[in-house]
Image: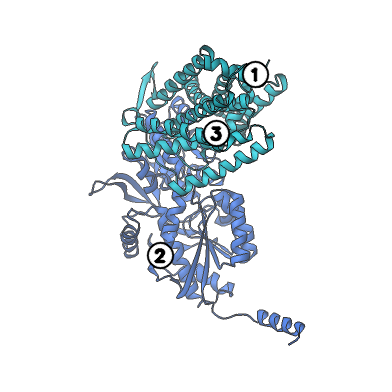
Amino acid sequence: MSKPLRAALLAAAIASAPAFAADKVKIGFLSTLSGPGAGLGVDIRDGFQLAVKSLGGKVGGLPAEVIVADDAQNPDTAKQTTEKFLKKDKVDFMTGIVFSNLMLAVGKPVFDSHTFYISANAGPSQYAGADCNPYFFNVAWQNDNLHEAVGKYVNDQGFKNVVLLAPNYPGGKDAMSGFKRFYKGKVAEEIYTKMGQLDYAAELAQVRATKPDALFFFLPGGMGINFVKQFVAAGLSKDVRLFAPGFSADEDVIKAVGAPMLGLFNSSHWAHDMDNAANKKFVADFQKEYGRLPSLYASQGYDAALLIDAAVRDSKGKLEDKAAVKKALEAAKFASVRGAFKFNSNHYPVQDYYLRLIRQDGQGRVTNKTMGTIFTQHADAYVGECKMK
Amino acid sequence: MSQLILEQALNGLQFGLMLFLLAAGLTLVFGIMDMINLSHGSLYMGGAYFAAAAAQASGSFAVGILAAVAGMALVGTLLELAVLRHFYKRDHLSQVLATFALILIANELVRMVWGPQPMMLNPPEALSGPVEILGFFYPAYRLLIIGVGLAVALFLYLLVAKTRVGMWVRAGAANREMTEAMGVNVRRLFTAIFALGAALCAIAGALLGPLLAVQVGMGENILILAFVVIVIGGIGSIRGALVGSLLVGVGDTLGRALLPTLLRSVASSEVASNLGPALASILIYALMAAVLFWKPQGLFPARG
């Protein structure tokens, strides 16, 4: 066979390549697995891997290959790894990113390559509103949501003078606007800190001087651990009530801080004591596999894997048929551990948000207990700006 | 308001004194040996990890600190003997490259031994709460840090200003060749200084571990500040390192605390919250630029 002919045949073979079912599913899992934010990424990864394992190493009936990589909470690293996932590994789905600034950094190349991104955490307002994209799905929440729930609760409890504190990055800005959307009292001070800041002495002195009746803080991962410890060490807990979204009050923070967390009210779309079959199995399996209670991050990772499983199954494994996969993702036919939820037109969840309280449970563990519902079937505030193509 | 400023000044003092522990070693190594040691921050990281590991194994924070100091002094000595002394005669670029390689090696080593996730190091139970001073509450642990920092600064002052070894050090910083010609064993002096610098790093790492986080790469951020300090203070001068550290520590803390508030009185809160933190983090670099402009040798130059 002559060389040109062989090349032509090869080209023809590639051009006519499978419009049929794929033989396996490649998932690029890029998350923060080192540094102060590592606890979050590790929990998402463990939840995700647990779901894949419980599905027998398959998603939608096809063998799953999960490629795990660390972004070190660095946008440049995240971009490089994303390029590798898209061009070299040719993944079918991407997931795992924790921080919104990283999500916004990698979004464009992912969407341009027509790869579906299933966010198990980062839910920036940009992708919920004007920049919404058919290839982006968030299976957890929109960034503002948990903060909106705390804002509503703090408002309902009659607090009138509140200091807000969040890191200076897109997720922190979303947190502040979410809280203020439902809190109508006076905002005594809005403090933005550097992302990854670990020493809060200056901010705590400022809080002491401001004399608020409550303080709302959003500091995911190691930042929150340090903040609560230093807040208690500064003796502020006697005068100022702390409120936080579930991110700053889940197992990762509780494990590190311990008893000072007792009595902290927080919000979440999920809790480990929620009474549904999927959740009971998840919490039991997670404890058996990893020897610790799952956090909300772990539940999000678990749900992300179940969503991909449902999408591959319902599109009959035809991953090249993007319209079919998108339709299957939008339908989200899986038993979520948070109970019923559905996707809004901007591919963000419409779901319930709960109030949780950290206290000692029957076994003497310091952990969250669900106290009630703050929002039912709550959608995000940006869906109106989204013109989904 | 005065109470706020007092509390912020204490915070700045605490931060500044810890910077001093790092900058003191760095300035001596740079000033006397004319050696740029980028891996100084790795010694700080090593100290924090040694302290965390020893404190976890023994259950005692004090044991953790002692183990960190002893361990890092040993590591510092070995490092000087095995690697760094071969670079004293080389140009600064080779030194930067070699010690940057040491940073990468140290980070990977720590990752291999202790894993990529931060390690927990808790302050002793008795110091985890607040104490009342001058009518307001202040964290007891931060007071301890201030106390230790002041004690070490005093010790260094006495060592450098009042002892024979200190005289050699000062002589070495002012004119190395002449000091050698006068019969001082400079090689042995260098090893001792390097071990001392490593031990100071270990104290800073062990003390800041419970406040910050014991994690891979913790040395790099603080190293930049330590370099700013020695440039402001004058390379080779312990007194300059102390003054520079306190300027940077207090300046950074007060800037972070007061700038956003000040800005809010002249601009909208949206602008203030965006601009404030950015300006505050630029402040110390602006200070450094100003010092370089008016006093290029630093505030207290060691060489006449």
Judge from the rendering whether residue B47 lies leftward or rightward of residue B220; answer left or right. Answer: left
Look at label 1 and name its amino acid.
Ala
Q: Which residue is mark 1?
A: B181
Indicate the amino acid at tag 3: Glu
Q: Nearer the viewer's eye, disc 2 or disc 1?
A: 1
Labelled disc at residue A51: 2
Q: Do the residues marked 3 and 1 share a common chain?
A: yes
In this picture, residue A364 sits left or right of residue A377: left
Badge 3 element: helix
- Whether residue A185 is visible here, answered yes or no, is no
Amino acid type, mark 2: Ala
Q: Quadrant of residue B300?
A: top right
Vertically, is A39 above or below A236? below
Q: Is residue A196 left or right of residue A256?
A: right
Taking the spot 48% from the left edge, 16% from the top edge, the residue there is B154
Q: Colour of chain A?
A: blue
Residue B267 % position (x, y): 63, 30
Kindly identify which residue carries mark 3. B80
Q: Is residue A312 above or below residue B299?
A: below
Give percent across and percent down for residue B196: 50, 26
Quadrant showing the C terminus of chain A: bottom right
Give the chain letter at badge 1. B
Q: Nearer the viewer, mark 3 or mark 2?
A: 3
Tag 3 near tag 1, CB within 8 Å: no
Closer-to-camera residue (A306/B31): B31
Identify by letter the chain in cyan.
B
- Screen quadrant of the N terminus of chain A: bottom right
- Looking at the picture, tell me which residue is in the foreground, A199 or A343: A199
